[in-house]
Image (cartoon, rainbow, N blue to C red):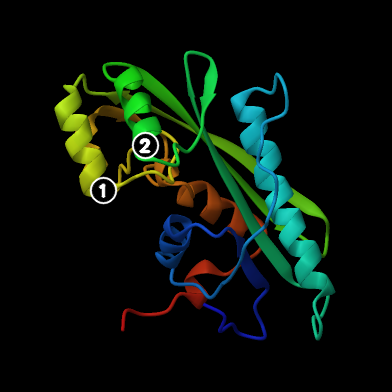
């Protein structure tokens, strides 16, 4: 979505994730999307929360810098950039995106009957004022102890190879889950909307004055 009112701050989602874009669309506000193109490798010895928070801010700043330097850009004036990152952790170590079937199956087998923490970090970067709002929303997910044939069937049905933890809780992956504990039900999908709307209000963004009606 690139249509925006001249009276509104330019709102940019620094993400190539279709899941985060779909979540932001729920707010019915105009926004743009830009991929941050960063190395997301954790630093040696870095805690999961620290990785998520660092990358969320880095993504927002990288996209803001590129947008400000673009031809015909008004610069950083009136620009709000949303950065987000999610890191899953289990037994004290980070769990990345599996990237393929065998790695996803190994993740699910290891996590069955256990609890996994998902750190969903969120940044709202006010580029004009160089103000960063940042928060880590933690979700604890307890997975069901399911037999391998059911895990295999799930993976073949939904192919969740691009999400940390190998399960899409917004889809069929919810059937793998025994319980979810979080202050924000949208955090697990990757963009905590409760925290984001709080940040937007703090930044002075008129949420209800800009929301579009359902077509």
Q: Which residue is depicted at the point 34% across and 20% down?
A: 111
Q: Residue 171: horizontal and vertical position, in percent?
A: 25, 48
Q: Which mark is residue 32?
A: none
Residue 151 is drawn in which quadrant? top left
Q: Which residue sits at x=40%, y=23%?
A: 116
Seen from the viewer's position, the closer of residues 196 and 12 is 12
Residue 178 % position (x, y): 22, 26
Q: Position of residue 22 (x, y in %)?
A: 41, 62
Disc 2 vs disc 1: Cβ atoms closer than 8 Å? Answer: no
- Between 156 and 18, the residue placed more toward the observer is 156
In this rendering, the answer to whether 56 lies above or below 5 is above
Q: CA–CA distance between discs 2 and 1?
A: 10 Å
Find residue 101 and report its image quarter.
top left
| Residue underneath mark 2 | 166
Say above or below: 73 vs 69. below
Q: Is residue 86 left or right of residue 124?
A: left
> Dot 1 surroundings within 10 Å: few (below 14), some, or many (20 or more)?
some
The residue drawn where x is 21% and y is 19% is 145
How many numbered markers are drawn? Answer: 2
Viewer-closest of 178 and 126: 178
Secondary element at image label 2: loop
Q: Residue at x 67, y 57 (%)?
A: 36
Residue 100 location in percent, x, y? Answer: 40, 40
- Position of the C terminus by quadrant: bottom left
Whichever of callouts 2 and 1 sits on the residue coming sooner in the sequence is 1
Quadrant in which residue 13 is drawn? bottom right
Disc marking residue 158: 1
Q: Is residue 76 visible?
A: no
Tell me the element at label 1: helix
How many residues crowd around disc 2 within 10 Å: few (fewer than 14), some, or many (20 or more)?
A: many
């Amino acid at each position: 979505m690139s249509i925006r009112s001249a009276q509104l701050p330019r709102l940019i989602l620094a993400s190539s994730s279709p899941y985060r874009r779909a979540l932001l669309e729920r707010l019915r506000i105009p926004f743009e999307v830009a991929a941050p193109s960063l190395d997301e490798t954790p630093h040696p010895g870095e805690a999961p929360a620290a990785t998520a928070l660092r990358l969320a801010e880095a993504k927002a700043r990288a996209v803001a810098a590129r947008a400000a330097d673009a031809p015909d850009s008004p610069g950083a004036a009136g620009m709000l950039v949303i950065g987000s990152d999610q890191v899953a952790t289990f037994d004290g170590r980070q769990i990345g995106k599996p990237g393929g079937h065998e790695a996803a199956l190994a993740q699910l087998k290891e996590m069955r009957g256990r609890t996994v923490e998902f750190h969903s970090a969120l940044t709202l970067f006010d580029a004009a004022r160089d103000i960063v709002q940042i928060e880590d929303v933690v979700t604890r997910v307890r997975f069901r102890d399911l037999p391998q044939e059911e895990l295999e069937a799930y993976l073949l049905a939904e192919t969740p190879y691009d999400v940390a933890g190998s399960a899409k809780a917004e889809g069929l992956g919810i059937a793998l889950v025994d319980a979810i504990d979080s202050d924000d039900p949208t955090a697990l999908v990757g963009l905590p909307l409760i925290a984001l709307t709080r940040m937007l209000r703090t930044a002075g963004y008129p949420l209800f004055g800009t929301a579009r009606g359902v077509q």
